[in-house]
C-alpha cells in the first residue's frame, strides 16, 4: 500500500479538476482518479459529461465557445501544472470511516488518504436506441440548458413526464418554434405547478401514451424526426423535428460507495455546510451532489469549495 496522501479526488470534469487545481495550489499534492468507461457506466469518461458535448457557449471566459473535450483538456493541464497526480482509474470500493480513508481502484491497488473529495458526477439516462447514440450532439441531447440555443427556429421533441421534462420543455420554448412532449402515459408525473406551466404554454404540445422507437436520420448526420409508437392503439408514425431532448433523469455515479454516505431519494449525495458529507474528511462536489443546476460553472464552483473545505479541515487535524 502506498503512503497516505493528503487528499484524493475521485472523478474529474469541472468539479474534480477544479478541486485538484485548488488543492494542488494549497500544497496538498492531490491524487486524482479521473475515471474510465466501464460496462456499468459507459458515459463515465475522464473529463465527465462535457466530453460528450460538442460546443460549450455558456462558460465564462470563452466568448467564441469551446468544445467540451477542449475545455476539459485545459482544466486537466492546469491541474497538472500545479502538481496534481492524475491517474486513469475508477474507484471501485472504499472504506471512508476513520482518520485514514482506504480506496481500491480498478487496477486492484489500495490507496489511502486523510481527506477525500467525491466528484464522480451523474450520467444521463438514455432511451437505449442505436441511432440515439449515433446522433448524440447532432440533435440528440440530455441538457436543454446546455444546448437549447442551438435549436432556434426549429421544432423539437422532449421525452419525459417529470419535473425535469417540464423544465426542459418550458426552457426550450425560448428558442424552438414548437416543443412536442412525448410521454408514455396519459398524465404527467411532474409537480402540479410545473405541469400547469407547461400545459398553459401555447408552444408546448403533448403526445400521450407514446414512446420514441427510433431517431432519424443517421444518413443525414442530424436529427430530422423521430419514430413514435402509441402504446394504447399500437399506431406508429413519424414526427418531424430538428432535435430530441431526453429528460428522463440522471443517475448519480455513487455505486462504489455502497451506502456509506447519505443520499437523497434520487441517489444524490447529501452535503451540508458547503460540501461536507456526514463522514468527517469526506467532501462532495459537482453533479454527484447537485440535481438542481447541473452546469459546468456550478460544478467548478463546488470543486473550489470542496478543496477549500478539505484544506481547512486538514488544518484542524494538523496537516
Image (tube, rainbow, N blue to C red):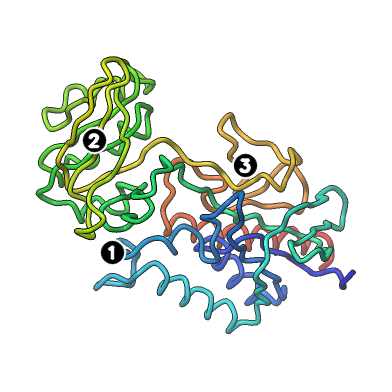
Closer-to-camera residue (210/84): 210
Q: Where's residue 37, x and y in %?
A: 58, 60
Alpha-carbon neighbours of circle 3 within 10 Å: few (<14), some, or many (≥20)? many
Residue lying furthest right: 1
Instruction: Name the residue located 34 percent from the left edge and 55 percent from the top edge.
Output: 136
Q: CA distance from mark 1 to mark 2?
A: 20 Å
254 w.r.t. 248: above or below: below
Q: Quadrant of the N terminus?
A: bottom right
Q: Identify residue for label 1.
A: 57
* Left or right, 147 with reference to 224: right
Alpha-carbon neighbours of circle 1 within 10 Å: few (<14), some, or many (≥20)? some
- Please report whichever mark, 1 or 2, sits nearer to the chain's N-terminal start: 1
Label at residue 269 = 3
Instruction: Name the residue located 32 percent from the left edge and 20 percent from the top edge.
Output: 231
* Left or right, 219 with reference to 313: left
Q: Identify residue for label 2.
A: 170
Q: Where's residue 35, x and y in %?
A: 62, 63
Q: CA distance from mark 1 to mark 3?
A: 28 Å
Secondary structure state at the residue bearing disc 3 = loop
Alpha-carbon neighbours of circle 2 within 10 Å: few (<14), some, or many (≥20)? some
Closer-to-camera residue (311/106): 106
Do labels 1 and 2 touch, CB within 8 Å?
A: no
Do labels 1 and 3 touch, CB within 8 Å?
A: no
Amino acid at each position: 500500500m502506498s503512503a497516505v496522501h493528503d487528499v484524493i479526488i475521485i472523478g474529474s470534469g469541472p468539479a474534480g479538476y477544479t478541486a485538484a487545481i485548488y488543492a494542488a495550489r494549497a500544497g496538498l499534492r492531490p491524487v486524482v482518479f479521473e475515471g474510465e468507461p466501464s460496462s456499468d457506466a459507459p458515459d463515465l469518461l475522464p473529463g465527465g459529461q462535457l466530453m460528450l458535448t460538442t460546443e460549450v457557449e455558456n462558460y465564462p471566459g470563452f466568448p467564441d465557445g469551446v468544445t467540451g473535450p477542449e475545455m476539459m483538456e485545459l482544466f486537466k493541464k492546469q491541474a497538472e501544472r500545479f502538481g496534481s497526480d492524475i491517474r486513469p482509474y475508477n474507484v471501485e470500493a472504499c472504506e471512508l470511516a476513520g482518520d485514514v480513508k482506504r480506496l481500491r481502484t480498478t487496477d486492484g491497488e489500495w490507496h489511502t488518504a486523510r481527506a477525500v473529495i467525491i466528484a464522480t458526477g451523474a450520467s444521463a439516462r438514455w432511451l437505449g436506441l442505436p441511432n440515439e447514440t449515433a446522433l448524440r450532439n447532432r440533435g440528440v441531447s440530455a441538457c436543454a440548458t446546455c444546448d437549447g440555443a442551438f435549436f432556434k427556429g426549429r421544432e423539437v421533441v422532449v421525452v419525459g413526464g417529470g419535473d425535469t421534462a417540464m423544465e426542459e420543455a418550458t426552457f426550450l420554448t425560448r428558442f424552438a418554434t414548437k416543443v412536442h412532449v412525448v410521454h408514455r402515459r396519459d398524465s404527467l408525473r411532474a409537480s402540479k405547478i410545473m405541469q400547469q406551466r407547461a400545459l398553459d404554454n401555447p408552444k408546448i404540445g403533448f403526445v400521450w401514451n407514446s414512446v420514441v422507437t427510433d431517431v432519424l436520420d443517421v444518413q443525414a448526420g442530424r436529427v430530422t424526426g423521430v419514430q413514435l409508437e402509441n402504446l394504447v392503439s399500437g399506431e406508429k408514425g413519424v414526427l418531424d423535428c430538428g432535435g430530441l431532448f431526453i429528460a428522463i433523469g440522471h443517475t448519480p455515479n455513487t455505486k462504489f460507495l455502497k451506502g456509506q454516505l447519505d443520499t437523497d431519494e434520487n441517489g444524490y449525495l447529501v452535503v451540508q455546510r458547503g460540501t461536507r458529507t456526514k463522514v468527517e474528511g469526506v467532501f462532495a462536489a459537482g453533479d454527484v451532489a447537485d440535481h438542481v443546476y447541473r452546469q459546468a460553472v456550478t460544478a467548478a464552483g463546488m470543486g473550489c469549495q470542496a478543496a477549500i473545505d478539505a484544506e481547512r479541515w486538514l488544518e484542524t487535524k494538523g496537516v
